[in-house]
Amino acid sequence: SPPSAPVPRHRIPQIPLNPARASRASPAMAAAILRRLSPAAAQRAPPRLLPPTLARGVSDSTEPLTVETSVPFTSHIVDPPSRDVSTTPRELAAAFRDMALMRRAEIAADSLYKAKLIRGFCHLYDGQEAVAVGMEAAITRRDAIITAYRDHCLYLARGGDLVAAFAELMGRVDGCSRGKGGSMHFYKKDANFYGGHGIVGAQVPLGCGLAFAQRYRKEGTVTFDLYGDGAANQGQLFEALNMAALWKLPVILVCENNHYGMGTAEWKASKSPAYYKRGDYVPGLKVDGMDFLAVKQACKFAKEHVLENGPIILEMDTYRYHGHSMSDPGSTYRTRDEIAGIRQERDPIERVRKLLLTHDLATAQELKDMEKEIRKEVDTAIAKAKESPMPDTSELFKNVYVNDCGLESFGVDRKVVRTVLP
């Protein structure tokens, strides 16, 4: 056979995670998994430096390099972006660290819940980290993000404090929502992160409202409006899509398709699970949501698109390793082989690790040392969060009304009646 074409300089294709295992996998299992899960202009923040104690010998170079996404983008009534993504060794190392930190934090939250230090609902994000980190790499803190109840890692991606995250999970006063929101209601106003919503799909119209405000104020920013495949059939989603398209709002509707709404597989709930096409007259893009660089490229493309043309849908093909929530073992409606297969072949952290190792940007030991430091960082944050007191009962009445807001209305005699709220 003729020799393969040389790889252009600085253009690095992604390498399968484990070709040896792929050749040994059960054909039936592999086919089943692949059939259902395979993916087909504000000022930028300065580049983030790796903490010195974690950088070690990991490359901190900012020399540009180009990496090809794992699979092509699939599009609906819009030309897809290029598969060639510009990145740097520094960005790859930072992405590895951020995703590893999120993974460790979610595993720790699982343990805290089982120890009854976290109460109520708790929905974990492990497996989906590339969506949060890739999105953040493409936008600025002036852009807004709003999501559903699987929100811990998006808060951290927006620069959220790890101690405040664990304090909120445990209902402590130093939490990001003063201990009143809990797992489903993280919030970070100074980074335009608006939560954290417990009602399925209810955040989608709110996200369109944020985008309306951005357009009205001519801010030149956008809103990333996230929801899951379980919310993709909600009527309020289609109402919001209609208004967003009608008014050309700068909103990116991001469907985090992890393929299971609670315990219901997407093919049991949706006649057409091609969620990126569900907007009909709204353009869409299907993205490998387990590929950090593909998510970054898609979000960058989407931001540029909506500022000129109005809304777009991004369907992130991703996967959650835990069950829907802590009461769901996650193994009654899917097999352990399926979960193990995704971990081996598509894990977002392992993909970036493979890039760093294959192209001599880090050694295996350096990355292990980084993960050890992350474990210590998470343990330290939990210890500090436990020291935070529970909120005083008076906290219950704070942030209910806007101070000095008042209310103006007209009585039957057309005289203005003003009521000052307490």
Image (cartoon, rainbow, N blue to C red):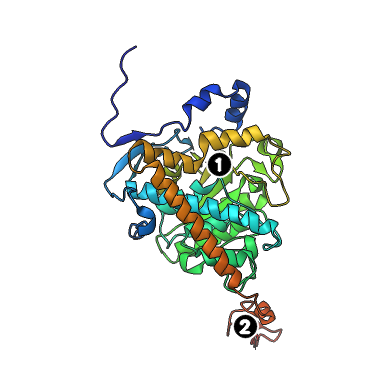
Tell me the quarter of the picture where residue 136 sits. Answer: bottom left
Camera-side residue of 82 and 18: 18
**Mark number, residue 408:** 2
For residue 58, above or below residue 416: above
Residue in the picture at 66% in, 83% down:
410
Q: CA distance from mark 2 to mark 1?
A: 48 Å
Can you see residue 194? no
Q: Earlier in the sequence, mark 2 or mark 1?
A: 1
Q: What amino acid type is highlighted by mark number 2? A: Glu
| Residue identifier under label 1 | 318
Identify the secondary structure beneath mark 1.
Answer: loop
Residue 402 spot, x, y in % from top left: 59, 79
Q: What amino acid type is highlighted by mark number 1? A: Thr
Camera-side residue of 249 and 44: 44
- Front of the two marks 2 and 1: 1
Task: Answer with left or right where residue 345 lies relative to residue 33.
Answer: left
For residue 401, above or below residue 87: below
Identify the secondary structure beneath mark 2.
Answer: strand
Residue 249 spot, x, y in % from top left: 49, 56
